[in-house]
Image (cartoon, rainbow, N blue to C red):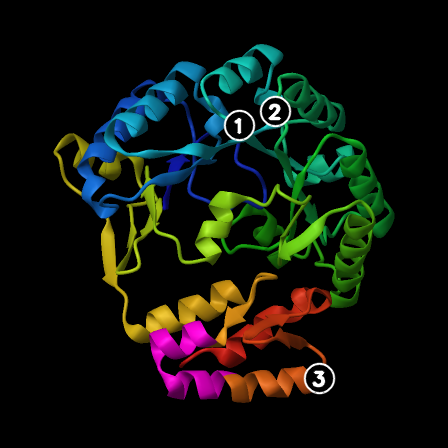
């Protein structure tokens, strides 16, 4: 099985914290679908004979495309690839782009999962983040999606906001659990270099929250989500049983995927590829039947580290038999030696040959995972 990711780079507005490749324009948007269709054919051999299980429209702002463009892309995928009988087809959307008519159309053409970029139900938070929607639009977007027969709705929330507080974070979570939402992606605010928000930090206009407060808000997330039937299955992702993101889970389980559109990444177990962060360069290469991106052949060390980085992020953990079979007994023994240290500290648990970081230690797991990596 495999997945396909389509990066839609267009935005109406650049958020204060966003570091993803996007452009604040709709110029050229009308030709985007046809370019993706050409790239689908051009890159077809990257996933030879693999059945497509998941399709994900990310961005940027995919909800800036109209339903006809999305339908054309989906039809092109079905013409050129074998699609599974029950694919997961996700569209990222901003609350203010969604209407009842659009949602009904999206559902009718096969989109069966929405990832709505809400970030907060607080108007104060939303203003500081530079979001275009307000809290009422966020609530309405979820309810409209549910009424349009979407039963797999994910929302994004951000915690660790410097101008917010824990009471607002609790209120955000309470509102999320009141709504017909089956999946949460909750991220700590990151000050990416070059973003307007990071520049405000440098100028002393914004002060990042303390690590203690960040940990407190993360623990509140875990406690409240568990009480509401959500499983914390990956560091930043929580969902009801049966509603884990199949597409994102494929990333963490080394499933091949093809990335289309400017800046999109691809992986097939042999190489890691990425498209240029430029609409113009990407467009020109596709029109000339060329792949203008870059490619890196993965060494055994790369594959070993990739496996550890992705598997230890999840509740499925790392499998010692997989490590020994794919990377050798020396690597397996080194893994066991490192794991034993964290087992004694109560950070890692194991069941048979499966080793995983306890979810209560997810927030500080980066340091633990890095200790396992081959330098």
Percent x, y for residue 260? Answer: 32, 39
Percent x, y for residue 53? Answer: 41, 40
* Residue picked out by circle 2: 150
| Mark 1 residue crowding within 10 angstroms, few (<14) / some (14–19) / many (20+) | some
Between the residue at mark 1 and the residue at mark 2, the CA separation in whole angstroms equals 6 Å
Q: Which residue is painted at 23% across and 39% down in the image?
A: 281
Picture quadrant of residue 219: bottom right
Percent x, y for residue 271? Answer: 26, 59
Q: Is the C-beta separation of discs 1 and 2 under 8 Å?
A: yes
Determine whether 74 is above or below 264 in the image.
above
User: Magenta stretch: residue 163 in it?
Assistant: no
Q: Give the range drawn in magenta.
A: 321-335
Q: Earlier in the sequence, mark 3 or mark 2?
A: 2
Q: What is the number of the mark on residue 112?
A: 1
144 horizontally vs 75: left or right = right
* Residue picked out by circle 3: 345
Residue 292 visible at all = no
Question: Is 208 or 96 nearer to us in this picture?
Answer: 96
């Amino acid at each position: 099985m495999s997945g396909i990711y389509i990066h839609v780079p267009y935005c109406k507005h650049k958020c204060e914290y966003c570091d993803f490749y996007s452009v604040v324009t709709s110029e050229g948007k009308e030709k985007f679908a046809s370019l993706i269709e050409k790239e689908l054919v051009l890159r077809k051999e990257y996933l030879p004979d693999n059945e497509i299980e998941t399709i994900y429209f990310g961005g940027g702002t995919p909800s800036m495309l109209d339903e006809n463009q999305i339908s054309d892309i989906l039809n092109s995928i079905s013409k050129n690839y074998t699609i599974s009988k029950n694919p997961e087809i996700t569209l990222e959307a901003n609350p203010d782009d969604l209407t009842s008519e659009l949602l009904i159309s999206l559902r009718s053409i096969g989109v069966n999962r929405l990832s709505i970029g809400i970030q907060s139900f607080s108007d104060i938070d939303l203003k500081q983040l530079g979001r275009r929607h307000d809290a009422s639009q966020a609530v309405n977007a979820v309810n409209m999606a549910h009424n349009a027969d979407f039963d797999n709705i994910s929302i994004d929330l951000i915690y660790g906001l410097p101008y917010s507080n824990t009471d607002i974070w609790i209120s955000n979570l309470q509102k999320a659990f009141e709504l017909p939402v089956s999946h949460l992606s909750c991220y700590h605010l990151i000050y990416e270099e070059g973003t307007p928000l990071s520049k405000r930090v440098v100028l002393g206009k914004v002060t990042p929250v303390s690590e203690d407060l960040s940990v407190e808000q993360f623990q509140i997330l875990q406690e409240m989500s568990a009480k509401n039937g959500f499983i914390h299955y990956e560091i930043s992702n929580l969902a009801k049983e049966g509603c884990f993101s199949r597409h994102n889970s494929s990333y963490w389980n080394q499933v091949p995927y093809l990335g289309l559109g400017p800046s999109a990444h691809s992986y097939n177990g042999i190489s890691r590829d990425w498209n240029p962060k430029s609409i113009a360069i990407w467009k020109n290469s596709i029109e000339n039947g060329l792949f203008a991106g870059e490619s890196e052949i993965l060494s055994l060390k790369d594959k070993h580290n990739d496996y550890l980085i992705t598997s230890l992020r999840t509740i499925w953990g790392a499998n010692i038999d997989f490590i020994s079979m794919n990377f050798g007994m020396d690597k397996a023994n080194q893994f066991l030696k490192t794991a034993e240290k964290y087992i004694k500290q109560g950070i890692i648990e194991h069941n048979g040959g499966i080793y995983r970081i306890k979810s209560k230690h997810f927030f500080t797991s980066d340091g633990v995972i890095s200790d396992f990596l081959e330098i």
